[in-house]
Image (cartoon, rainbow, N blue to C red):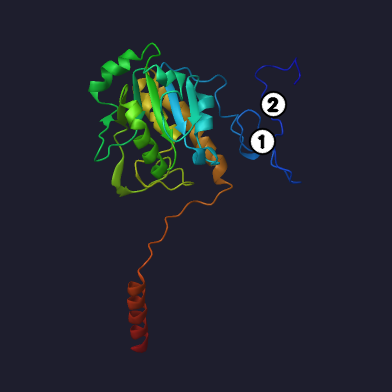
Amino acid sequence: MDPEADEGDIRHLPFTTSPEIHRRTICSNCQRPNHVCLCHALPAHPIQTTTRVFILHHPHEAQHKLSTTPILTKSLLHATSITGRRLRRGLSPLLDQSPPAVYLFPSTTSSLAVDISDPKLSELIRSGENGGLVLIAFDATWKHAREMVKASEKFLSKFAIRVCLGMEDEKVSGGSIYDSELILRKEPFGGCVSTMEAVARALRVLEPNGLEIEGKLIGILREMVRLQAGFLKPMKPRPKLLKKKKVKEVEESESSENENL
């Protein structure tokens, strides 16, 4: 690298381990393919927060091209991630200290979550104004996230409170990872969002300048999806499969109608 180059000058260096002749170059800064590089959308300096963000990244999700965790950790100064399937003692020096913490996951019949806007959490939020509060998120498919939370709750129950964004609804058909705009990945039910959006919405409540932080993170997410949308086909809901008996009844009915014409 040129020692006289300006510190703000981002270098896009080819990086690949593929032996193929036509190699896809990867940006050395954002670690995304150069044709969907996000460096122009990332903040010049990582966003400062009093809340420390910790993300448990499922091994499968870590390989996904649309994972938002890498971009999130580059956008926030106090955001870190670890790849794994459960949280436990010895995995993170930060969590081993049992700091005041909240972890994001909707309520289930066996484990209820407190709305992150609930006034009962105000004291906990105030305790983190000097950098004490930790926000924990799980980055995985819905199925894997359930498993990760269940496996981690015994450890988390000692110092963390389970919170939700107050918008998840399993009775509503799945939307996209950003309301109706991000059409690249199908979510299991209404209110599900990407890890980056979930963290952004949580920080809106937890941080004094939360609205500003949320706006910056969502702006980066919009740009990521805009770039990616040009290379991927939108995900369509899987058509409902009829049982063989039902299919036969439909075919016989159509055949009968044709004969009567």
Classed neighbour count for the residue bearing mark 1: other residues with Cα under 10 Å, few (<14), some (14–19), many (≥20) = some
In the displayed structure image, the side of residue 162 where residue 41 appears, left or right = right
Q: Residue at x 27, y 39 (%)?
A: 108
Identify the residue position indicated by label 1 in the image. Answer: 26
| Callout 1: SS | loop
Q: Residue at x 53, y 30 (%)?
A: 71
Task: Residue at 28% x, 26% y: name it.
Answer: 117
- The front one of 74 and 110 is 110
Locate residue 172, reporting x and y percent: 30, 48
Q: Is residue 17 left or right of residue 207?
A: right
Quarter of the image with the N terminus is top right
Quadrant housing the C terminus: bottom left
Name of the residue lying farthest toward the front? 90
Decide which of tag 1 and tag 2 comes sooner along the chain: 2
Q: Amino acid at mark 2?
A: Arg
What's the residue at 32%, 32% (across, down)? 165
- Residue at the extreme top of the image, as rendered: 130
**Front residue of 169 and 101:** 101
| Residue corresponding to mark 2 | 11
* 136 vs 187: above or below: above
Q: Amino acid at mark 1?
A: Ile
Give the CA separation, mark 1 to mark 2. Answer: 11 Å
Q: Taking 161 as reference, is 254 above or below it? A: below
Q: Secondary structure at mark 2?
A: loop
